[in-house]
């Protein structure tokens, strides 16, 4: 839940720009929300504020019973590690590690070890996303689209109750995008809350709810216009 979230940035010259302006948003447990809007509208900044990666200049954000503004860095890190899974627009992997070791990093950091159940879960995720044969490959040896799928597996390895995704399919071809969206559908059906930033109508069309940003403000999602709808005999009035 976010209330009156505003985010301002000040340049070294002292100029202030407002990226988010008074955002109110409720996200129920189990929702599947798509945040849409043109580039520069504030989508990624809002996602960062909702997940505790950034702090709003004013306003409040809550995850469950936790007001993020009251948590110190250690508590925020614990919340993100135990509650959130992150898929970033540009997936950062440790190139000196194998694909499998990159995926398992969050499990190691959370528990200090990797259980047989986690290994089985990871293998299923990798197979589901078409990278099941890449586990032993070095991260620097795989393509950009494969790296993105590795990042998605890494975000899901701890079975987080909330998945935060910023353009998760931007580097993927259509078939791989459909595989990812099918997985997201299944996760959401099993209770995972999903918040995704996207420009892709194919992605936003799978979501249960949509919110649209323009110039840092929440507006109603756009609807198809008659100006862009193919003319038929019925809408010509014939």
Image (cartoon, helix red, strand yellow):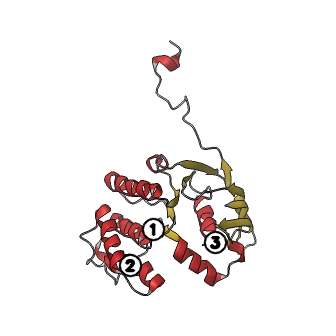
Callout 2: 10 Å neighbours few (<14), some, many (20+)?
Answer: many
According to the picture, the residue beneath numbered tag 3 turns out to be: 54
Residue farthest toward the bottom in the current orientation of the protein: 112
In this picture, residue 126 sits left or right of residue 55: left
Q: Residue at x 60, y 50 (%)?
A: 211
- At label 1, counting other C-alpha atoms closer than 10 Å, the crowd grade (few under 14, some 14-19, many 20 or more) is some
The picture places residue 83, in percent across and down from the top left corner, at: 54, 71
Q: Secondary structure at mark 2?
A: helix
Please name the residue that numbered disc 2 is placed on. Answer: 104
Q: Nearer the viewer, mark 2 or mark 1?
A: 2
Let me know if residue 61 appears in the view. yes
Give the residue number, with chain letter if any, for mark 1.
90
Say left or right for 89 vs 149. right
Between discs 2 and 1, the one toward the N terminus: 1
Query: Which residue sits at x=40%, y=54%?
Result: 181
Q: Are marks 3 and 1 in contact (CB under 8 Å)?
A: no
Residue 166 lies, in percent from the top left, at 50, 62
The answer to whether residue 71 is left or right of residue 87 is: right
The crowding category of the residue bearing disc 3, from other C-alpha atoms within 10 Å (few below 14, some 14 to 19, many at least 20), is some
**Residue shown at 36% from the left, 81% from the top:** 115
Query: Circle 1 — which element?
Result: loop
Q: Position of residue 150 (x, y in %)?
A: 36, 70
């Amino acid at each position: 839940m976010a209330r009156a979230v505003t985010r301002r940035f000040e340049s070294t010259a002292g100029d202030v720009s407002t990226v988010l302006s008074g955002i109110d948003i409720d996200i129920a447990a189990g929702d599947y929300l798509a945040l849409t809007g043109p580039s520069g509208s504030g989508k990624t900044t809002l996602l960062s504020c909702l997940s505790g990666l950034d702090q709003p200049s004013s306003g409040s954000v809550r995850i469950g019973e936790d007001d993020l503004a009251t948590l110190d860095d250690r508590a925020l890190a614990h919340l993100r590690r135990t509650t959130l899974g992150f898929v970033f627009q540009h997936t950062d992997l440790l190139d000196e590690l194998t694909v499998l070791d990159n995926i398992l990093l969050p499990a190691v950091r959370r528990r200090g070890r990797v259980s047989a159940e986690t290994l089985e879960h990871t293998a299923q995720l990798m197979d589901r996303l078409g990278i099941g044969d890449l586990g032993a490959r070095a991260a620097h040896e795989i393509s950009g689209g494969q790296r993105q799928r590795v990042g998605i597996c890494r975000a899901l390895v701890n079975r987080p109750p909330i998945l935060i995704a910023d353009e998760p399919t931007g580097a993927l071809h259509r078939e791989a995008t459909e595989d990812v969206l099918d997985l997201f559908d299944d996760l959401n059906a099993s209770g995972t809350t999903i918040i995704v930033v996207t420009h892709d109508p194919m992605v936003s069309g799978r979501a249960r709810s949509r919110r649209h940003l323009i110039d840092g403000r929440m507006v109603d999602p756009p609807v198809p216009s008659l100006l862009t709808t193919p003319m038929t005999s019925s809408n010509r009035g014939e």
